[in-house]
Amino acid sequence: MQDPSTPADPGSTPPPARRRWGCRLLRQNLARAQAQAERAAASEDELLQGLQGLVLQLQAIADGLPAHGSARDGLERVMAHADALLARASQPRHGAQTDQAGLVGRWLRWWRSRP
């Protein structure tokens, strides 16, 4: 037996029930998108922290090398590049906030296009 709160064909339900069904679907999709965004952010944070740890280890190695050796100069160039990557990766991304807004917009366009 089918649950009456989740109609098989939303087009055959009365308008208030269809709205409830659509709102429930929207909430579920938004929750799913938010959970995915949080997992991606946590993974990105972990990656950035790991890179920062590597840079600190390289700095410790460079500190043990002679002040003007080619090995130290090479390590300092690599660390400068890694620092630039860290700075760029640490900046907030504006597209991350619009993912959910895009989902809502697509859903609203779909909803309005229905008969």
Image (cartoon, grey):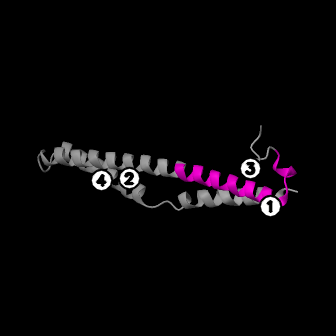
Contact? badges 2 and 4 (CB < 8 Å): no
Identify which amino acid the numbered label 1 is placed on. Answer: Pro
Picture residue at 85% right of the left edge, 51% below the top: 11
Contact? badges 3 and 2 (CB < 8 Å): no
- Per the rendering, the mark at residue 16 is 1
Q: Is residue 16 left or right of residue 82?
A: right
Picture residue at 24% right of the left edge, 50% below the top: 76
Label 4 neighbour load within 10 Å: few <14, some 14-19, many 20+ = few
Label 3 neighbour load within 10 Å: few <14, some 14-19, many 20+ = few
**Residue 60 percent coordinates (x, y):** 17, 47
Q: Which residue is mark 4?
A: 80
- Per the rendering, the mark at residue 5 is 3
- Per the rendering, the mark at residue 85 is 2
Identify which amino acid the numbered label 3 is placed on. Answer: Ser
- Mark 2 vs mark 4: which is more N-terminal? 4
- Mark 3 vs mark 1: which is more N-terminal? 3
The image quadrant that residue 86 belongs to is: bottom left
- Mark 2 vs mark 1: which is more N-terminal? 1
- Mark 4 vs mark 3: which is more N-terminal? 3
Real-space CA distance between mark 2 and mark 1, rounded to the nearest whole angstrom: 52 Å
**Residue 64 percent coordinates (x, y):** 12, 45
Is residue 20 highlighted in magenta? yes
In the rendered view, tell whether residue 73 sits above or below residue 20: above
Q: Is residue 39 left or right of residue 21?
A: left
The boundaries of the magenta stretch are 9-35
Label 4 residue SS? helix
Q: Nearer the viewer, residue 71 or 35?
A: 35
